[in-house]
Amino acid sequence: MTTSASVPAGPEGAIVGTVTDRLVDANEQYAAAFTDPGMDARPVLRVAVVACMDARLDLHAALGLELGDCHTIRNAGGVVTDDVIRSLTISQRALGTRSVVLIHHTGCGLESLTEEFRHDLEMEVGQRPAWAVEAFRDVDQDVRQSMQRVRTSPFLLHTDDVRGFVFDVKTGLLREIDPA
């Protein structure tokens, strides 16, 4: 299967360079035609989107967003962790966002992991990770938990417009989750 990140092949199918080399080459082409859009770091729509890092989620396309519209914070599962609260706090207090949109998705890899993952890592490398895996079995409930974490954070100024969704990777549709 060929993807946009495929590494070019040379004679007899030999791989030329690395994926990172391909990305750097693509950046050089991008930069050659780049013009400074003259934007401020503050998102135009005053919204922060927290989503899973899954490569199947093209958030800008799925939400009709343009460059400069939002802050995007991504991690495994789109889970609201301490680091997400850190980013949201900076987004709100320093850069003016007022709304938070949380997006988890169907078929998430965190649904097949457990906290045992941390134990396995400890056995392999000799050190237990300080972070939680944040695995889950019920994506709707995990969205509710993430909404609750945002709404109850003492560091966030704006917690009245927090909405959570599940993105269906087969249809591209968002399904809103009732926080109750």
Image (cartoon, rainbow, N blue to C red):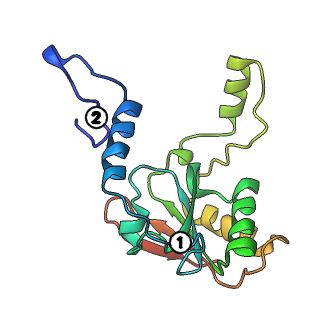
In the rendered image, which quarter contains the N terminus? top left
The residue drawn where x is 27% and y is 41% is 3
Q: Which residue is mark 2?
A: 6
Nearest to the observer: residue 19 or residue 50: 19
Nearest to the observer: residue 176 or residue 102: 102
The residue drawn where x is 37% and y is 59% is 169
Image side of residue 169 versus residue 175, left or right: left
The amino acid type, in three-letter code, at marker 1 is Cys
Image side of residue 139 versus residue 11, left or right: right
Q: Secondary structure at mark 2?
A: loop
Q: Position of residue 41 (x, y in %)?
A: 59, 69
In the rendered image, which quarter contains the C terminus? bottom right
Q: Which mark is residue 52?
A: none
Is 127 above or below relative to 51? above
Specify the farthest residue to the left. 12
* Image marks 1 and 2: residues in contact by CB distance under 8 Å: no
The amino acid type, in three-letter code, at marker 2 is Ser
Is 42 above or below relative to 80? below
Q: Which residue is mark 1?
A: 70
Task: State which tag comes first along the sequence, 1 or 2.
Answer: 2
Q: Secondary structure at mark 1?
A: strand
Specify the farthest residue to the bottom. 160
Image side of residue 104 versus residue 79, left or right: left
* Residue 178 quadrant: bottom right
Image side of residue 132 versus residue 139, left or right: right
